[in-house]
Amino acid sequence: MQRNRLRLAVAVSIACTVLLSGCAQPGSTSSAPTPSAITSQALQRPVRSCETPLGCSEFASVRGSDATGELAWLGTHPLRVTSARFDGVWTLHVATPCNHLQVQVSVQDDVLTPGLVSVTDRGCEDPTGSYQAWIEKLFEQPVQWKLDGDTLTLRNAHATIDLKES
């Protein structure tokens, strides 16, 4: 019995060695990073800057509406919006009543055009789950924005939201 286990262990070891040695054939152009490359990439952090039209201010929703009318939840379960530049890309951070969105935006005049959107996905019970879906829909299309004093207004065909600097 002991001898069979030893034979099995040796056979598995030889099989693994043969399989792994086939991954790095002489002359191959493997793109596997070296340990030092992995370490240096892990130490590099994105460069964050507040050089955006909104600075590094935080805004909280106070009211809003869509085709159905006024949305009271925007006042009772406010969105929190901040922005920053990461490696030169303007990114909006939107804290919803349930999750977070990061929306890369390009700006032309008074229009924010959404690019890459990242969303956390905690299982949200309604009504906050439906609020999350509503916010995601807002950033599926360009958003007109206006900063007037301490009030930020976001508007498109989906909705209008007023946010106050907090």
Image (spheres, rainbow, N blue to C red):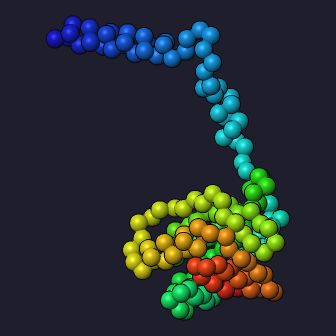
Residue sitting nearer the eye, 17 or 2: 17
Residue appearing at x 68%, y 31% in the figure: 37
- Name the residue at 49% across, 12% down: 21
Say left or right for 59 vs 132: right
Outermost front residue: 157
Instruction: Identify the residue shown where x is 71% and y is 63%.
Output: 105
Q: From what the image shows, is residue 5 above or below residue 146?
A: above
> Which of these two is toward me, 8 or 110?
110
**Which quadrant of the rendered structure holds the N terminus?**
top left
Residue 110 percent coordinates (x, y): 78, 75
Q: Is residue 97 above or below residue 118?
A: below
Quarter of the rendering containing residue 11: top left
- The reply to whether residue 137 is visible in this rendering is yes
Give percent across and percent down for residue 163: 67, 84
- List x then y, in percent, for residue 40: 71, 36
Q: Quadrant of the C terminus?
A: bottom right
Q: Residue at x 32, y 9 (%)?
A: 10
The answer, for residue 71, to whether it is visible in the render is no
Q: Is residue 16 left or right of residue 111?
A: left
Q: Position of residue 115 (x, y in %)?
A: 66, 59
